[in-house]
Amino acid sequence: MTASALIIDITLWGSVAILGFMAWRRGRVVLVSSVREGSMDFINIVPRIALGVVGSGYIAAVIPPEVITGWLGPDSGWFGVLTAVIAGAATPGGPVVGFSIGAVALKVGGGTPQVIAYVVAWALFAFQRMILWEIPFMPARFVWFRAAVSLPFPFLAAAIAMVIGKP
Amino acid sequence: MIFIGALVAVSAGLVWRRDGIDGVLDILSHDLWLFGEIIPRVLAGCLLGGFIAEILPHDKVSRSLGPESGLKGLLIGTAFGAILPGGPFTAYPVAAALLTVGADFGATIAMVVSWTLIGYGRAVAWELPILGTDFTLWRIVISLPIPVLAGWLGRIVFVRIYPKGEPE
């Protein structure tokens, strides 16, 4: 286990312990009912997470990262931004893959507004995170709603990057 | 879930045709390992969500994060998403808990979007080393207004689609 994973686990279970203590101070009933609620959520979510984890591995294997890098070539202009947004949503894997593809695109001459759009679109729409985490935990209506109203923002980020000429 | 299941089945079929049964089993064993690693964190996230749903006073949450909370509610959601520790295994259960105790779609969207775009965890651990300080800082500065704008847009659209509040 790496140091950062250890830190994550410590903060996570530390927060659980603190909130659990706060619930216990409100009384045994509050503690018991919140633990029961959390455990029921957990039991309901495990099969969906299982499908998400195992399933997204196969989906990722079908979409190799090279395909994404190809999309992010040194195009420029708004067509490049649009391609970058689609590529961001279609990028499989975790943050290492997403950010590395952004770094490669910068190296091969992709414009920074396009790479900004790519990273922002990846943060907002990466299909693997949505399938694996957001859809199992959140009400479906919320997920689609959230994705729909987020649509303009990779383009807005690219526009801001073009206007201010940074990074 | 049926759609995702079908997508997974098709993808697994493609992997099987390309790499044979070994390819399928390789991915399966890797992902089962990952699943085992994730599952305790999911439990912690669910417990956090359960505690938050019980401890947070509903009237206070709906006042500060509800439909009538205005810009302040969106800013609170954004700040909360930015400082929330942990990964998706905390962010989504906590966001779901906020929805159940009276936060509206707008404030919750601000929180989730803020967590993905300006949450420090991923930026420090992955983006800085891979994309460099200059790019990362400007990317975050450019992203700063997005959670509030997305939450605001969410509220506008929500009122148009559900004029009488969210259906059951």
Image (cartoon, grey):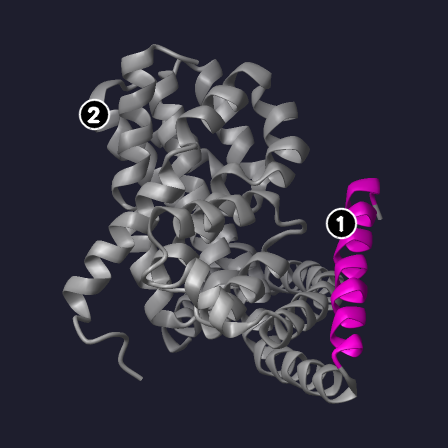
- Quarter-wise, where is residue A26 in the image? bottom right
Question: Which residue is rendered at x = 45% and y = 17% of the image?
Answer: A106
Question: Is residue A119 visible in this depiction of the protein?
Answer: yes
> Tag 1: residue type?
Ile
Secondary structure of residue under mark 1:
helix
Q: Pick the quarter of the image with the C terminus of chain B.
A: bottom left
Does B101 appear above or below B154? below
| Residue receiving disc 2 | A78
Packing grade of label 2 (10 A; few <14, some 14-19, many >=20) is: some
Question: Which residue is rendered at x = 35% and y = 30% of the image?
Answer: A117
Secondary structure of residue under mark 2:
helix
- Quarter-wise, where is residue A16 in the image? bottom right
Write down the region rendered in magenta. A2-26
On the image, the x and y values in percent for residue B38 come to: 70, 62
On the image, the x and y values in percent for residue B146 come to: 36, 38
| Residue receiving disc 1 | A8
Does A126 appear above or below A58? above
